Amino acid sequence: MSFRVLYDANAVFGALLRSILVRVGQHQVEFHLRVFLTDEILDEMLTAVSDKYPDFTADQGASLKVAMINAIPDCLLTEFAHAMDKAEISDPKDKHVLAAAIHGRVQVIVTDDQDFDTSSLDPHSIESQNPDDFLTDLFDLNEAAMKQIVGEEASARGETVDAVVDLLEQRGLIRFAQHLRR
C-alpha cells in the first residue's frame, strides 16, 4: 500500500525544490508513495512564478506544467469539486487543495502554508508537512534513493552533489541537507 501525498503550490514554487520533488515523484515506488498534483495547484504555482519572474512566459509555464504532469506517473487529481463542501479551512484560496486531498484520500499535504492546521486537517486524517521534514523523512526511509535523486539533480545541473546540498541548505532545507552530509 502506498502513502499518498499532495504537493501544494508553495512546495513546487522554487526550481530546485520543485525538481527534487518531481524526482521523488519519479521514484515514488522506492518510497512506497503516491504523489499527487492538481491543475489548480500547478496553475497557482505558475502564477506565483510569473509574478516573481516577469520574463517567465505563458509558453514556458505551459511547458513546465506538462513536463511535471508527464514526469510523475498518474499524478493529476481531478473531479474533486464534490469535496469542496467538506474542505473547511481559514484561507478560502486553499480550499481547492484540501478538497483535492480529501478526494484523493491523501495522508500528507507537503506545504509551508500555516493555514493547513490541525483543525482543518484532523477531521480528514490528513497532516501537513513542510518540504524539509518531508524530504528528511524520505531520506530516513530510503537513504540510497534520496542520495540518487540528489545525484541526478547535481548531474542535471552540471554541479557537484556538495554544491546542490549547499543550495538545498540555502533554500531552507536545513535538516535534509544535514542528513545528506552524514
Image: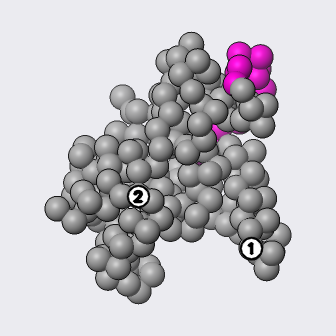
How crowded pointer 2 is (Cα within 10 Å; few <14, some 14-19, many 20+) is rated as many
Q: Is residue 51 above or below residue 42?
A: below
71 horizontally vs 176: left or right:
right
Q: Is residue 59 highlighted in magenta? A: no
Q: Tag 2 or tag 1, which sits nearer the N-term?
A: 1
Q: Point out the image quarter for the N terminus.
A: top left
Please identify the quarter of the rendering in which residue 37 is found.
Answer: top right
Query: In percent of the image, x 36 and y 58: which residue is there?
Result: 174
Q: Residue beneath label 1, please?
A: 53
The magenta segment is 74-89
Residue at the extreme left of the image, as rendered? 182
- The secondary element bearing badge 1 is classed as loop
Q: Report the disc number at residue 179.
A: none
Amino acid at pointer 2 = Leu
Most common secondary structure along the magenta stretch:
loop
**Residue 72: percent from left, percent from top:** 53, 53
Q: Tell me the CA gap for discs 1 and 2.
A: 22 Å
Amino acid at pointer 1 = Tyr
**Residue 144: percent from left, percent from top:** 21, 58
Query: In percent of the image, x 55 and y 43: which residue is there?
Result: 111
Residue at the extreme top of the image, as rendered? 123
Q: Is residue 79 highlighted in magenta? A: yes
Residue 124 shows in this picture: no
Q: Residue beneath label 2, please?
A: 173
Please identify the quarter of the rendering in which residue 101 is found.
Answer: top right
Between 10 and 101, the one nearer to me in the picture: 10
Between 73 and 59, the one nearer to me in the picture: 59
**Residue 2: percent from left, percent from top:** 39, 33
